[in-house]
Every structure is written in C-alpha cells, then in structure tokens.
Image (spheres, rainbow, N blue to C red):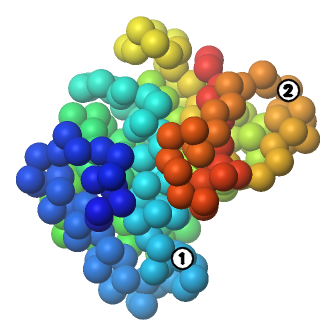
C-alpha cells in the first residue's frame, strides 16, 4: 500500500482501506482460483495495482464516464481504476467465468459499487458503447482495436483526450504496432514510476 501512496495521495479513507485490503483478498482467492501467477502474488501492489494505475496517472477520467476493461482476468486494470475513480462506471469483461467469479467476490468484499461484470468476449457485445476501452496485454494491438472500436462512442468527455483504447503492454512493440496499422501514442511507464519493473512497460493509446 505504501507504494501506491508514494505516487498518489488524494484518497478518501474509504479508498485507502479498499486499496489496503486488496493484498490479503487476492492472496486468499488466489489459493482457490489461480488468477495471478504465484511469482507475482507477492508483488501484487507493484506488478498489478500500481501498474494498472499508470492509466490513472495519464488519463483524468471524469464523473459519469463509462469504461470497458477487455479481458480483465483477475480484475486488472479495472479493479484498481474503479477504486481510484469511484464516480466512473467500469464494465469488466472476460471470457473465463472462474476469473470473473474472483473479481466479483473482490468487488463485493470491498463494496466497490461502480463495477459491472459480463462473462463474454468483447467482440460479442452488442448495443453498448463506452468512452474508453482499457486492457492489459491480453491480445495483439490489432485485435484489441478491432474489438474495442465498435464499442467506443465518438462524443468526447475529456478535453485533453479523444475517446479510445488504452493498453498496458511491455517489451519491444515495434512489430505489433506496425501490424495493427495504427499510429498510437506510446508512453513509457518508467517516465513516472521509478521502480525497475516498469522499465520496459508502456501505455499505448489509440484514439477513435
């Protein structure tokens, strides 16, 4: 938790309590249903929570916005972002039901009320639109863009950014970006988080 407060400190007591409880909750649930690798569970706050909040460090989501988390897995980046932005609605989607079971249990335990869940593939969602799509490295950029673009509304609510797709990815992304046919904005997470884990981690932003 100290790691989160190193970079962010404008939290209510309720938010601090929610972030503080994440470690024990995930450790307990991970023993029942493995949603986080064994080697990462001891580094949950660095490799999962703070990593997710890299999006919050760059994108000031506002009250009333709707965000879809594609392939949320164990709830990242959706769960930390929902705690960070309690007035923003997050829709967490995954094709694996047992992972969503863990995410729903964590959200219920922490009284995170601005989250909905759907057991489906993003490409099968019909009749809904969002301001932004977020995702970790669950698929190549070209696929994430193909899935998310039909779900993104055009009317923007942020002056600084057009609606779009925001991905957390790592490593050399040159070929992946080339194959996507996009010209996304790429920001190094190491520019604002100093831990060595973030040295080859990037935020990829593709506006509509």
Q: Which residue is drawn at 21% across and 34% down?
A: 87
- Classify mark 1: helix, strand or loop: helix
| Residue at the farthest bottom position | 31
Residue nearest the observer in this picture, 51 or 136: 51
Instruction: Between residue 20 and residue 3, name the one nearer to us.
Output: 3
- Label 1 sits on residue: 40
Q: Is residue 8 above or below residue 96?
A: above
Residue 34 rendering spot, x and y as whole percentages? 51, 83
Seen in the picture, residue 63 relative to 97 is either above or below; the reply is above
Few, some or many residues within 10 Å of mark 1 (<14, 14–19, 20+)? few
Classify residue 91 as left or right of residue 62. right
Residue 92, relative to residue 126: is it above or below?
below
List the residue tagged with mark 2: 181
Identify the element where label 2 is drawn: loop
- The reply to whether residue 203 is visible in this rendering is no
Q: Which of marks 2 and 1 is nearer the N terminus?
A: 1
Q: In this view, does 5 lie to the left or right of 138?
A: left
The image shows a total of numbered marks equal to 2
What percent of the width, then of the height, locates residue 183? Answer: 78, 22
């Amino acid at each position: 938790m100290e790691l989160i407060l190193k970079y962010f400190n404008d939290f209510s007591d309720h938010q601090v309590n929610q972030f503080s409880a994440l470690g024990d909750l995930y450790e307990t649930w991970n023993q029942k249903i493995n949603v986080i690798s064994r080697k990462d569970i001891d580094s949950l706050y660095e490799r999962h929570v703070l990593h997710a909040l890299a999006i919050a460090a760059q994108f000031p989501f506002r009250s009333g916005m709707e965000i879809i988390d594609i392939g949320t897995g164990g709830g990242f980046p959706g769960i930390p972002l929902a705690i960070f932005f309690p007035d923003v609605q997050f829709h967490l989607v995954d094709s694996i039901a047992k992972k969503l079971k863990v995410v729903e249990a964590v959200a219920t335990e922490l009284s995170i009320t601005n989250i909905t869940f759907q057991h489906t593939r993003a490409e099968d969602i019909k009749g809904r639109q969002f301001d932004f799509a977020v995702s970790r490295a669950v698929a190549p950029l070209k696929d994430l863009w193909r899935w998310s673009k039909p779900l993104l509304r055009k009317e923007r609510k942020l002056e600084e950014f057009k609606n779009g797709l925001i991905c957390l990815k790592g490593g050399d992304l040159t070929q992946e970006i080339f194959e996507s046919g996009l010209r996304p904005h790429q920001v190094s997470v190491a520019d604002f988080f100093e831990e060595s884990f973030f040295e080859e981690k990037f935020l990829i932003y593709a506006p509509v």
